[in-house]
Image (cartoon, rainbow, N blue to C red):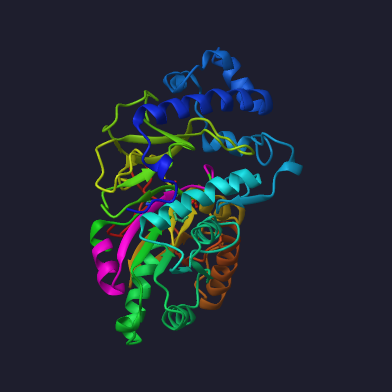
Amino acid sequence: MAYYQEEIETMSRDAMTALQSERLVKQVRHVYDNVEPYRKKMQDAGVEPGDIKGIEDLAKLPFTTKDDLKDAYPYGFLALPLKDCVRIQSTSGTTGKRVVAFYTQHDLDLWEDGCARAIVAAGGSDTDVCHVCYGYGLFTGGPGLNGGSHRVGCLTLPMSSGNTERQLTFMEDLEATIICCTPSYAAFLGESAHDAGITGKLKLKSGIFGAEAWSEEMRREIEKSLGLKAYDIYGLTEISGPGVSFECEEQTGMHVCEDHFYPEIIDPATGEQQAIGTKGELVFTCLTKQAFPLLRYRTRDITLLSRDACSCGRTLTKMKRLMGRTDDMLIIRGVNVFPSQIETVLVGQGYPANYLIIVDREHHTDTFEVQVEMSEDVFSDEVKVIEKKEAELLAALRSMLGISPKVTLVAPRTITRSEGKAVRVIDKRKI
Ligand code: DLL
């Protein structure tokens, strides 16, 4: 059995708890001394660093939310001088919703270690050719898996996303054995490889897929079409990026890198900590990060934790495949989209807030349409006028969201009014 960091990945529960406790105590002192919003939150909650003696005291600490980060944008949660930081990464979204995460070299190292653990758990070694087609840039997918692949010593193909024909050519010619991308792109590549008649020529053995929700059915379909074993990988920019947790060959959930990121499940309504095995909202505490060390960050992702023995020998707590979110965030073609962002653009462009977001999946690619109702004063039945207005709206939405929806303007009073809560999103994807 191969591990990237065997001592940590197979550590006894008692030793892990002791390590986590020691790290938490230090981390709480670091944030209290250096992050103003945390000092204030802890003072408001009547907690001092000295009250936190180990992981059992974690629930005494206040939560952190995306809104806290937004209010403190961009530097409020930075715990070190900028001169000590070497990188930023960011979530997609508006300036208001965008989260900018800062990393020291140490933070990049532990993030890449998480990705390296994932690659080794998927059967990777220095003899592999690792084809990374997550996006590179501010998105954490490309840089994270790229770094992990280097650490393992794979020959790394930094392909980034797009240009499917070139992806397939490199995959075939350079005999890629591991592929890292979103599951929907993997399914699309499978279909494209079939159309190009090269399925039998590919040497892929493992795929590391994450950043969006996918199902067991989709897993089996991708495994069949690309001829590989498909592993789930999870992460989020606020906590580091991909590799916060990763799947092993048992394929029954993702081992959390809990020596760095302590996972809790809470009841999203009350904030109460839940027992292992209970479904709820996933919360993470960064135990070792230096520059952007969030405590009890509410991910809004719903799952449950498990400490059942795993056949791979890893003792790291597992989180099950994600079961949804507690907020209205949509992930469309890998980009995080909030309906409120769309509303901001519409209102800013003089449209009423009557709109419908329709998301579907065709040929394994997300389709994304925004239907917008014209008010009487912008209404026109001239096709040219409408097309011009649609193009203007599309440009504004693209600039806000980072992806392009199909924009359809509809006549006044044609979008069905709801009697209760407005229905703004129709998500037809079966995942
Ligand atoms: O999506 C990091 C990542 C990159 C993970 C590549 C895996 C692979 P964000 O853009 O900040 O970061 O989005 C984080 O994406 O809170 C989940 O809702 C969702 N998500 C991430 N991984 C999975 C997964 C990256 N395996 C948000 N299954 C998270 C389902 C996932 N949803």
Q: Is residue 228 left or right of residue 210?
A: left
Q: Nearer the viewer, residue 156 or 328?
A: 156
What range of the chain is rendered magenta?
Answer: 219-239
Q: Is residue 99 left or right of residue 117?
A: right
Q: Nearer the viewer, residue 408 or 76?
A: 76
Q: In the displayed structure, would residue 225 be above or below residue 239?
A: below
Q: Is residue 383 left or right of residue 175?
A: right
Q: Point out residue 207 in the picture as x, y percentages from the top left corner.
A: 37, 64
Q: Nearer the viewer, residue 59 or 2?
A: 2
Q: Point out residue 33 in the picture as x, y percentages from the top left corner.
A: 67, 23
Identified at 32% across, 87% down, the residue is 197
Determine the image quadrant of residue 138: bottom right
In the picture, which quadrant includes the C terminus? bottom left
Farthest residue toward the bottom?
A: 197
Identified at 61% across, 53% down, the residue is 348
Residue 234 belongs to the span the image colors magenta: yes
Q: Nearer the viewer, residue 294 or 395?
A: 294
